[in-house]
Image: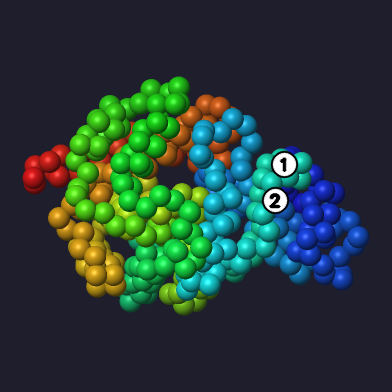
Amino acid sequence: MSVLMSTSFNLPAFSAYLRNHGISTNNDLPKDISEALIIKPLSGGQSNPTFYIEAGKQKMVLRKKPTGHLLPSAHAIDREYRVMAALAKQGVPVPQMLNYCEDESIVGTPFFLMSFLDGRVLTEQALPGMTTTERAAIYSEMNRVIASIHAVDYQAADLESFGKPGNYFSRQITRWSRQCNESNLPISSALQRLMEWLPAHIPPGDETTLVHGDFRMDNLIFHPTKPEVIGVIDWELSTLGHPLADFAYQCMAWHIPPTLWRGIGGLDLTTLGIPTEAQYVAQYAANTGRNSAEHWDFYLAYNFFRIAAILHGIAQRVVDGNASGEDAIANAQRSEPLAELGWQCALRYSASR
């Protein structure tokens, strides 16, 4: 078998780790599993390097921190592992967690292993090649799954200490503003305006649920043939927070044109069989009982600020030489136009008050 790997992999140590933790005990494997390992980088995993691992009949995924200087609180793979392990019993589809390891001598940084799910990752939100019925079913399933995440009893799931309940927007705005200010790259004018505008316009009222933090189509693994999510992945940004903030994050796609990034803004949704934003929001309201209409533009402005701040951080990692993903540079360049979209949402919200 062949091996494609990061130079940080210590193959003898990694094969011993698999043996010692009972993760791969196939009788057909040689004593030194490294002779039979297949390790391939997986696409995606913009923040944390992700690899497909095959050891005999065992198929799994390894997710690790990147190497080099990291911004504070970033790349929290321990949180990813913890939340997915907890959700295995909560009705949210996630891969099976196999093991978490903090020993940096094995693959260069801490990592965790999870089961490999053989399904579809849909990267184009217009879903080319599908029928209108198939597209509608995919979007309906996504809505159902995010509603199920927000319905999790996080206390019963032993996630009460996973975040701080309440005051979510204020804390998140402070966090991402601080991360932008800690970088040594110039902050775009739109991003700077959002950093100043958002704290003064946080809507009244609050609610706390488990939130994914990066819920979008290509962070879902669908059944090979059915419109069924078999795994929600990439939980690095998950915490306890406001469900409408989490939901509005996915709904940015209706405002982002495909020419800018992954989005469906400006497409003929009726012809495609994809729900409009209003229809998708109404479906979430039916699934959860939550009404988001009054402050919707604030939720969108907040999320455009947040994604622009995240991409600003990716730009910093590009400069530092430790960005993960071949499209890191292109993603970094999207920070400013996305912040501009957020500022337009902020202006609409201010005008409606």
Can residue 41 be seen here? The reply is no
- Numbered label attached to residue 10: none
Total numbered circles: 2
Q: Residue at x 90, y 62 (%)?
A: 30
Q: Amino acid at mark 2?
A: Cys
Q: Nearer the viewer, residue 79 or 282?
A: 79
Q: Position of residue 108 (x, y in %)?
A: 71, 40
Q: Position of residue 308 (x, y in %)?
A: 36, 38
Query: Separation of disc 2 and disc 1 at Cα?
Result: 8 Å
Is 41 displayed left or right of 92 in the figure? Answer: right
Q: Residue at x 78, y 60 (%)?
A: 21
Q: Which corner quadrant holds the N terminus? A: bottom right
Location of residue 331 by image quarter: top left
* Circle 2: element type: strand
Q: Which residue is mark 2?
A: 101
Is 67 displayed left or right of 315 in the figure? Answer: right
Q: Position of residue 223 (x, y in %)?
A: 51, 73
Q: Which corner quadrant holds the C terminus? A: top left
Q: Nearer the viewer, residue 209 or 280?
A: 209
Q: Residue at x 33, y 47 (%)?
A: 168
Q: Residue furthest right?
A: 31
Q: Which residue is mark 1?
A: 104
